[in-house]
Amino acid sequence: MLIETDILVIGAGPAGSTAAKHAALGGAKVLMLDKKSEIGAPKRCAEGVSIGGLESLGIEPNPRWVTKKLDGVRMVSPNGTDVWLTSDKVELPEAGYILERKVFDKFMAMDAARAGAEIRVKTLATGLRREDDHVIVSAECMDEEFEIKAKIIIAADGPETRVARWAGLRTALKAKDMESCAQFEMAGVEMENNDVIEFYFGSVAPGGYAWIFPKGDDIANVGLGVLTTNTDKTAYQHLLEFVENCPATKNAQPVELNIGADPVGGMPKKMVADNVMVVGDAASQVNPLTGGGIISGMTGGMLAGKVAAEAIKEGDASEKRLSEYEKVCRAEIGDSINKYLKVKDYMMTLSDEELDSIADVFKDTDFERVSTGEIVKTLIKVSPKALLKLGKIF
Amino acid sequence: MIVKEWCMYCGGCAGVCPRNLIEVRELTLKFNEDECKECSLCVQLCPVDALEQE
Ligand SMILES: Cc1cc2nc3c(=O)[nH]c(=O)nc-3n(C[C@H](O)[C@H](O)[C@H](O)COP(=O)(O)OP(=O)(O)OC[C@H]3O[C@@H](n4cnc5c(N)ncnc54)[C@H](O)[C@@H]3O)c2cc1C
Ligand code: SF4
Ligand code: SF4
């Protein structure tokens, strides 16, 4: 069997669904595949997004997938010194929501369907080859094997990022660029204030950080990411230790275990080839400091979908034509990804003692407006090492 | 490669395999063993230690 389409999107995460939606809105014939039987499940995410980010994508918040509106941030250093940034004290331009990703991801896919995209679930892409001016992707759904002929494929297959590599793009992740993550969704979490997200830094999570993201009442995502180059223990072992030692989770019980990988090395040198574009985690469209990739991946998806639809109209799916996506994408999210990559590299050099002394100064600092950028600017003021490494960029 | 029963098919291992040898299905993991260079990057990445080199 051979299915023909203009645009084939592989992976129905937030990036893929957004690409499919915008490609279909642009008038192209779009097919989207996902190997999962349920889009959005299991979740591999702490579910935090910025409200402004959703707005910029034209997405109206829906009570069926927003679990919690956030009111700030609490950062905790290794010795327990904490820095509070809440709206009663500071203006918060990066206000956020905690989502229910299992519902959110499905809703984004439904939006793509309503825009005209065809969706196939439990359908795995297994390989691709180029033929003349198109690509043939092999796929499997249960006992059925078939081929899909597409003028453009959009690789949105997440951190596995296999599809783009079949097409010759170099999207593989180095160990130092991939966070290994583990998380419990828990009930009975006793936070000091369950309207803020909490970050824990230092040796609790070597090469990353631990988090508690509240989902309403006593429910929260409690997790962490580590770089395997920086520890001999698994992310899961670190998580068990964190949960046992953190005052907020001592009496909490898990109802879900989530694991996954988060690409934090910045976007690859190339994100397009003839007939091929790569978006989302598959192209490391993730803030390297926070690991947040929902909004940036969807932004990449939106830009790719729009360019792909134009290219179809013009009958030109060459790398040269598709590189417009790469250009606008770097302009839109590339700079901030590069900046936060440098901040992450700097954070990595800090010992527990240095983190404690920075927290000590931060504790008494008056922030006027709080965004990740503002926090880094203050860091530069209090730490000479930060000034040296980051002074020029912020 | 031995895949332990507790693998959760998160796909992290596949992302760091430099040779793109790991196929992650919804509930199966398949290695192209012939091409494997035993660099063990996949084993180290796993958040739950579900891989063991034979
Ligand atoms: C523990 C953890 C916590 C995180 N917390 C946050 C957070 O709080 N906020 C935030 O913004 N980001 C967070 N992230 C990152 C965020 O989850 C990702 O950036 C986001 O999911 C990327 O979306 P995507 O669409 O690119 O990929 P994914 O959501 O991974 O979707 C990829 C899809 O492709 C499918 N697929 C893969 N291969 C194939 C194939 N061969 N054939 C068919 N289908 C295929 C998969 O089944 C999957 O559905 C976190 C990540 C982790 C691991
Ligand atoms: S990283 Fe571990 S749990 Fe995830 S798919 Fe690979 S072996 Fe399974
Ligand atoms: S050992 Fe190395 S080459 Fe072999 S499957 Fe794992 S990552 Fe790939």
Image (cartoon, coloured by chain):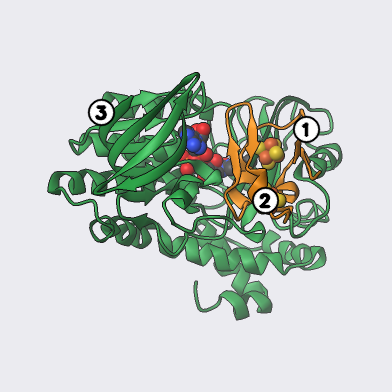
Chain colours: A green, B orange
The kind of secondary structure element at disc 1 is loop
Do the residues at discs 2 and 1 belong to one chain?
Answer: yes
Which residue has dot 2 on it?
Answer: B36
Q: Residue furthest top?
A: A143
Residue labelled 2 has its Cβ within 8 Å of some atom of ligand 3: yes
Q: Residues within 10 Å of mark 3 (few under 14, many from 20)?
A: some
Q: Which mark is residue B4?
A: 1
* Horizontal and vertical percent position of residue A306: 25, 45
Which amino acid type is marked by label 1? Lys
Comparing labels 2 and 1, the label whose residue is closer to the camera: 2
Do the residues at discs 3 and 2 belong to one chain?
Answer: no
* Horizontal and vertical percent position of residue A10: 41, 37
- Pinpoint the chain carrying mark 1: B
Residue labelled 1 has its Cβ within 8 Å of some atom of ligand 2: yes
Comparing labels 3 and 2, the label whose residue is closer to the camera: 2
Which residue has dot 3 on it?
Answer: A115
Which amino acid type is marked by label 2? Cys
For image coordinates 43% across by 56% down, the residue present is: A168
For image coordinates 51% across by 47% down, the residue present is: A161
Q: Residue furthest front?
A: B34
